[in-house]
Amino acid sequence: AQSVAQPEDQVNVAEGNPLTVKCTYSVSGNPYLFWYVQYPNRGLQFLLKYITGDNLVKGSYGFEAEFNKSQTSFHLKKPSALVSDSALYFCAVRDTGRRALTFGSGTRLQVQP
Amino acid sequence: DAGITQSPRHKVTETGTPVTLRCHQTENHRYMYWYRQDPGHGLRLIHYSYGVKDTDKGEVSDGYSVSRSKTEDFLLTLESATSSQTSVYFCAIGGRGDETQYFGPGTRLLVL
Protein backbone atom coordinates (compact mmCIF):
# COMPACT_ATOMS: atom_id res chain seq x y z
CA ALA A 1 0.00 0.00 0.00
CA GLN A 2 1.20 3.49 -0.72
CA SER A 3 1.76 6.12 1.94
CA VAL A 4 2.86 9.70 2.42
CA ALA A 5 4.59 11.19 5.44
CA GLN A 6 4.81 14.84 6.35
CA PRO A 7 7.07 14.78 9.40
CA GLU A 8 6.41 18.33 10.57
CA ASP A 9 3.02 19.37 11.91
CA GLN A 10 4.07 23.01 11.70
CA VAL A 11 6.81 25.02 10.05
CA ASN A 12 7.59 28.57 11.14
CA VAL A 13 9.56 30.92 8.94
CA ALA A 14 10.16 34.65 8.80
CA GLU A 15 8.89 36.62 5.83
CA GLY A 16 11.54 36.89 3.14
CA ASN A 17 13.34 33.73 4.22
CA PRO A 18 13.34 30.52 2.17
CA LEU A 19 10.89 27.83 3.22
CA THR A 20 10.83 24.06 2.92
CA VAL A 21 7.93 21.75 3.69
CA LYS A 22 8.99 18.11 3.78
CA CYS A 23 7.29 15.09 2.23
CA THR A 24 8.39 11.49 1.84
CA TYR A 25 6.44 8.78 0.08
CA SER A 26 6.22 5.05 -0.35
CA VAL A 27 4.75 3.59 -3.53
CA SER A 28 5.32 0.71 -5.87
CA GLY A 29 6.15 1.77 -9.38
CA ASN A 30 6.61 5.30 -10.63
CA PRO A 31 5.10 7.90 -8.33
CA TYR A 32 2.64 10.61 -9.32
CA LEU A 33 3.16 13.28 -6.64
CA PHE A 34 1.15 16.38 -5.81
CA TRP A 35 1.16 19.38 -3.50
CA TYR A 36 -2.03 21.16 -2.48
CA VAL A 37 -2.63 24.17 -0.26
CA GLN A 38 -5.65 24.87 1.92
CA TYR A 39 -6.50 28.31 3.25
CA PRO A 40 -8.86 28.60 6.25
CA ASN A 41 -12.40 27.42 5.50
CA ARG A 42 -11.54 26.77 1.88
CA GLY A 43 -11.11 23.75 -0.35
CA LEU A 44 -7.80 22.40 -1.57
CA GLN A 45 -5.98 24.31 -4.26
CA PHE A 46 -3.54 22.57 -6.57
CA LEU A 47 0.04 23.88 -6.41
CA LEU A 48 2.14 21.52 -8.51
CA LYS A 49 2.72 17.94 -9.54
CA TYR A 50 5.46 15.57 -10.58
CA ILE A 51 4.61 12.97 -13.20
CA THR A 52 7.88 12.50 -15.03
CA GLY A 53 10.77 14.55 -16.36
CA ASP A 54 12.77 17.20 -14.53
CA ASN A 55 13.25 16.60 -10.85
CA LEU A 56 12.58 20.28 -10.08
CA VAL A 57 8.94 21.13 -10.66
CA LYS A 58 7.67 24.70 -10.71
CA GLY A 59 4.16 25.54 -9.66
CA SER A 60 1.78 28.30 -8.67
CA TYR A 61 2.58 31.32 -6.45
CA GLY A 62 6.35 30.87 -6.79
CA PHE A 63 6.44 27.41 -5.24
CA GLU A 64 8.59 24.59 -6.51
CA ALA A 65 9.26 21.04 -5.43
CA GLU A 66 12.22 18.75 -5.78
CA PHE A 67 11.67 15.09 -6.57
CA ASN A 68 14.37 12.81 -5.19
CA LYS A 69 13.88 9.19 -6.17
CA SER A 70 16.71 7.76 -4.07
CA GLN A 71 15.42 9.47 -0.92
CA THR A 72 11.74 8.99 -1.90
CA SER A 73 11.13 12.64 -1.12
CA PHE A 74 9.17 15.47 -2.71
CA HIS A 75 9.89 18.58 -0.64
CA LEU A 76 8.05 21.82 -1.31
CA LYS A 77 10.17 24.97 -1.47
CA LYS A 78 9.94 28.68 -1.99
CA PRO A 79 12.91 31.06 -2.14
CA SER A 80 11.25 33.92 -0.26
CA ALA A 81 8.22 33.37 1.99
CA LEU A 82 5.26 35.75 2.17
CA VAL A 83 2.88 36.21 5.09
CA SER A 84 0.10 35.27 2.66
CA ASP A 85 1.72 31.83 2.22
CA SER A 86 0.54 30.92 5.72
CA ALA A 87 -1.80 27.95 5.21
CA LEU A 88 -2.08 24.17 5.49
CA TYR A 89 -0.07 22.21 2.93
CA PHE A 90 -0.72 18.66 1.82
CA CYS A 91 1.48 16.26 -0.08
CA ALA A 92 -0.24 13.42 -1.93
CA VAL A 93 0.59 10.42 -4.10
CA ARG A 94 -1.77 8.96 -6.66
CA ASP A 95 -2.89 5.35 -6.63
CA THR A 96 -2.15 3.97 -10.10
CA GLY A 97 -5.21 1.72 -10.06
CA ARG A 98 -8.01 3.82 -8.57
CA ARG A 99 -6.39 7.12 -9.45
CA ALA A 100 -7.38 8.35 -5.99
CA LEU A 101 -4.94 10.33 -3.87
CA THR A 102 -3.31 9.24 -0.63
CA PHE A 103 -2.55 12.29 1.48
CA GLY A 104 -0.08 13.13 4.17
CA SER A 105 -1.43 14.51 7.42
CA GLY A 106 -0.61 18.07 6.42
CA THR A 107 1.88 20.73 7.52
CA ARG A 108 0.80 24.11 8.80
CA LEU A 109 3.05 26.87 7.51
CA GLN A 110 3.23 30.04 9.57
CA VAL A 111 5.10 32.98 8.04
CA GLN A 112 5.85 35.73 10.53
CA PRO A 113 6.13 39.35 9.42
CA ASP B 1 -13.02 25.52 -8.11
CA ALA B 2 -12.84 23.90 -11.54
CA GLY B 3 -16.59 23.64 -12.05
CA ILE B 4 -17.36 21.65 -8.92
CA THR B 5 -20.10 22.52 -6.47
CA GLN B 6 -21.12 20.79 -3.28
CA SER B 7 -24.40 21.04 -1.42
CA PRO B 8 -25.19 21.71 1.28
CA ARG B 9 -22.11 23.64 2.39
CA HIS B 10 -22.97 23.28 6.05
CA LYS B 11 -25.26 20.83 7.81
CA VAL B 12 -26.12 20.00 11.38
CA THR B 13 -27.97 16.76 11.97
CA GLU B 14 -28.76 14.33 14.76
CA THR B 15 -27.39 10.89 15.37
CA GLY B 16 -29.35 8.21 13.54
CA THR B 17 -30.72 10.39 10.76
CA PRO B 18 -29.86 9.82 7.08
CA VAL B 19 -27.87 12.51 5.31
CA THR B 20 -27.12 12.96 1.61
CA LEU B 21 -24.39 15.20 0.27
CA ARG B 22 -24.29 16.17 -3.38
CA CYS B 23 -21.38 16.85 -5.66
CA HIS B 24 -22.05 18.40 -9.05
CA GLN B 25 -19.50 18.94 -11.83
CA THR B 26 -19.69 20.73 -15.14
CA GLU B 27 -16.39 19.38 -16.49
CA ASN B 28 -17.62 16.02 -17.81
CA HIS B 29 -14.95 14.12 -15.88
CA ARG B 30 -15.29 10.39 -15.70
CA TYR B 31 -13.65 10.01 -12.28
CA MET B 32 -15.18 11.46 -9.12
CA TYR B 33 -14.20 10.98 -5.48
CA TRP B 34 -15.44 11.60 -1.96
CA TYR B 35 -12.90 12.31 0.78
CA ARG B 36 -13.26 13.29 4.39
CA GLN B 37 -10.87 15.61 6.21
CA ASP B 38 -10.14 15.21 9.89
CA PRO B 39 -7.39 16.84 11.97
CA GLY B 40 -4.21 14.79 11.97
CA HIS B 41 -5.39 12.52 9.16
CA GLY B 42 -5.22 14.68 6.09
CA LEU B 43 -7.86 13.60 3.59
CA ARG B 44 -9.02 9.99 3.36
CA LEU B 45 -10.88 8.34 0.50
CA ILE B 46 -14.45 7.24 1.23
CA HIS B 47 -15.72 6.13 -2.18
CA TYR B 48 -14.95 6.84 -5.78
CA SER B 49 -16.61 6.48 -9.16
CA TYR B 50 -15.06 5.65 -12.50
CA GLY B 51 -18.22 6.15 -14.54
CA VAL B 52 -21.98 6.26 -14.39
CA LYS B 53 -23.18 3.49 -12.06
CA ASP B 54 -19.55 2.39 -11.51
CA THR B 55 -18.41 2.95 -7.94
CA ASP B 56 -16.05 1.36 -5.45
CA LYS B 57 -14.97 1.67 -1.85
CA GLY B 58 -12.10 3.60 -0.37
CA GLU B 59 -10.29 3.21 2.93
CA VAL B 60 -13.03 4.62 5.19
CA SER B 61 -16.24 3.49 3.50
CA ASP B 62 -18.04 1.94 6.50
CA GLY B 63 -21.34 3.72 7.13
CA TYR B 64 -21.35 5.44 3.72
CA SER B 65 -22.90 4.65 0.38
CA VAL B 66 -22.72 6.45 -2.96
CA SER B 67 -24.62 6.69 -6.20
CA ARG B 68 -23.85 8.06 -9.62
CA SER B 69 -26.81 7.99 -12.00
CA LYS B 70 -25.38 10.62 -14.36
CA THR B 71 -21.92 11.93 -15.17
CA GLU B 72 -22.30 15.26 -13.43
CA ASP B 73 -23.64 14.12 -10.05
CA PHE B 74 -22.06 12.00 -7.34
CA LEU B 75 -24.07 11.54 -4.15
CA LEU B 76 -22.72 10.49 -0.77
CA THR B 77 -25.21 9.09 1.75
CA LEU B 78 -24.73 8.51 5.44
CA GLU B 79 -27.38 5.88 6.10
CA SER B 80 -27.58 6.57 9.83
CA ALA B 81 -25.31 9.39 10.90
CA THR B 82 -23.00 8.94 13.88
CA SER B 83 -20.90 11.47 15.77
CA SER B 84 -17.76 9.91 14.30
CA GLN B 85 -18.93 11.10 10.90
CA THR B 86 -18.63 14.73 11.96
CA SER B 87 -16.10 15.96 9.44
CA VAL B 88 -15.48 18.10 6.40
CA TYR B 89 -16.35 16.28 3.19
CA PHE B 90 -14.68 17.07 -0.10
CA CYS B 91 -15.62 15.98 -3.57
CA ALA B 92 -12.96 15.80 -6.27
CA ILE B 93 -12.84 15.19 -9.99
CA GLY B 94 -10.14 14.16 -12.44
CA GLY B 95 -7.28 11.68 -12.32
CA ARG B 96 -7.37 10.11 -15.74
CA GLY B 97 -3.95 9.89 -17.37
CA ASP B 98 -1.84 12.81 -16.18
CA GLU B 99 -4.87 14.79 -15.02
CA THR B 100 -4.76 16.81 -11.86
CA GLN B 101 -7.46 16.12 -9.32
CA TYR B 102 -9.48 19.22 -8.43
CA PHE B 103 -11.52 19.68 -5.30
CA GLY B 104 -14.85 21.21 -4.49
CA PRO B 105 -15.38 23.77 -1.71
CA GLY B 106 -16.34 21.16 0.91
CA THR B 107 -19.31 20.40 3.14
CA ARG B 108 -18.96 20.84 6.86
CA LEU B 109 -21.10 18.24 8.66
CA LEU B 110 -21.82 18.20 12.37
CA VAL B 111 -23.59 15.18 13.84
CA LEU B 112 -24.98 15.82 17.31
Image: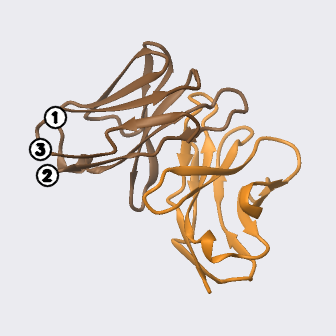
Chain colours: A orange, B brown
Amino acid type at mark 1: Ser
Q: Nearer the viewer, mark 1 or mark 2?
A: 2
Q: Mark 1 — residue?
A: B80
CA distance separating discs 1 and 2: 12 Å
Left or right placement of residue A53 versus residue A82 in this view: right
Chain identifier of the residue bearing label 1 in the image: B
Marks 1, 3 in one chain? yes
**Residue B70 position (above or below residue B34):** above
The subunit letter for the residue under badge 3 reads: B
- Residue A35 % position (x, y): 65, 53
- Going by the numbered disc 2, the residue's amino acid type is Leu
Measuring 11% from the left and 45% from the top, which residue is drawn there?
B14
Q: Mark 2 highlights which residue?
A: B112
What SS does tag 1 mark?
loop
Residue receiving disc 3: B15
Q: Position of residue B108 (x, y in %)?
A: 32, 49
- Residue placed at 65% from the left, 59% from the top? A24
Chain letter for mark 2: B
Q: Residues within 10 Å of mark 1 (few under 14, many from 20)?
A: some
Circle nearer the N terminus (3, 2): 3
